[in-house]
Image: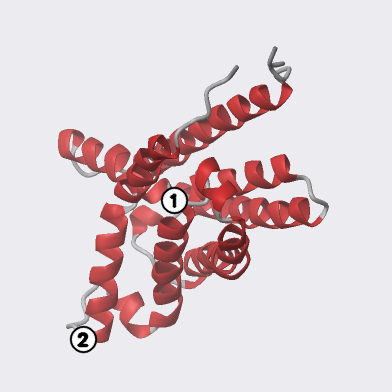
Amino acid sequence: MDTPRRPRREWPIAAGLILLALVPSIAGTFRIGEIASGATQTAENARFMEVPLPVVLHIVGALVYALVGAFQFLPGLRRRHVRWHRFAGRYLLVPAGLTVAASGLWMTAFYDTPAIADGPVAVSRYVVGTLMLAFILLGVAAIARRDYFAHGSWMMRAYALAMGAGTQAFTAGVSMAFLGEPTAFEHALQLDAGWLINALVAEWVIARRRARTRRPATIAV
């Protein structure tokens, strides 16, 4: 007979996701503090100081999405607290995720960004933002028809893209430390590597879940 999985083994997953979000969360908190305190306007922060609402919505939405979402993918916790899972998904994660994606697209389209963020980087951000919106909406549609596996899969894909900023702290930060200031194309590759790594991990987890659902049940004798 199969031994039930102990819930405490799942907590390192949530801890790892929170740690992954730590660097962009600190940077985002600093940015909000800069806006709230009326810091001196520079070429680097001018777009945020002049039009602060989109970036504030993006940062706050990302914090909620990353931190609350880290606990939504723990099967044991989800089974024991179904009502919380539904409440958090409906009233926190879906609105926060849509806000993150929509504000990210708006900033890409309308902010006066540095040259390194134009061209290939902008294209990547349009693609990722659009995919994130689509994945969340597909996840909502799946739960409406009670397709729980598809719901979890789409939401996991959206979360993986949203957590790209955490992985990019390594793919872009490490590359810059060793190779110096990148070109716009090189920077796009660094950012794309972060999103791609997260997307591949998400697909690996989804494939494992699919394999478990297809595995014949063990019959106790």
Q: Is residue 164 something one can see in this rendering? A: yes
Q: Nearer the viewer, residue 26 or 49?
A: 26
Q: Is mark 2 on a helix, strand or loop?
A: loop
Q: What type is the residue that disc 1 sits on? A: Ala
Write down the quadrant of residue 48 in the picture.
Answer: bottom left
Left or right, 32 with respect to 217, comes to: left
Task: Please say if 76 is above or below 136.
Answer: above
Q: Residue 37 carries which label?
A: 2
Question: Which quarter of the picture shows residue 150?
Answer: top right
The amino acid at mark 2 is: Ser
Element type where label 1 sits in the image: loop
* The one of 69 and 217 positioned closer to us in this rendering: 217
The C terminus sits in image quarter: top right
- Image quadrant assignment for residue 205: top right
Residue at horizontal 40 percent and vertical 82 percent from the top: 51
In which quadrant is the N terminus drawn?
Answer: top right
Q: Earlier in the sequence, mark 2 or mark 1?
A: 2
Residue 17 vs 114, above or below: the answer is: above
In the rendering, at what x and y percent does residue 197 appear? Answer: 44, 33
Residue 96: x and y in percent read: 53, 67
Q: Name the residue under label 1.
A: 70
Residue lying at 38% horizontally and 42% vertically, measured from the top left: 11
Distance CA(mark 2)–CA(mark 1):
30 Å
Identify the colour scheme used: secondary structure
Image location (x, y in percent) of residue 122: 48, 54
Q: Is residue 124 visible?
A: no
The structure residue drawn at horizontal position 26% and vertical position 62%, both measured from the top left corner, is 27
Q: Nearer the viewer, mark 2 or mark 1?
A: 1
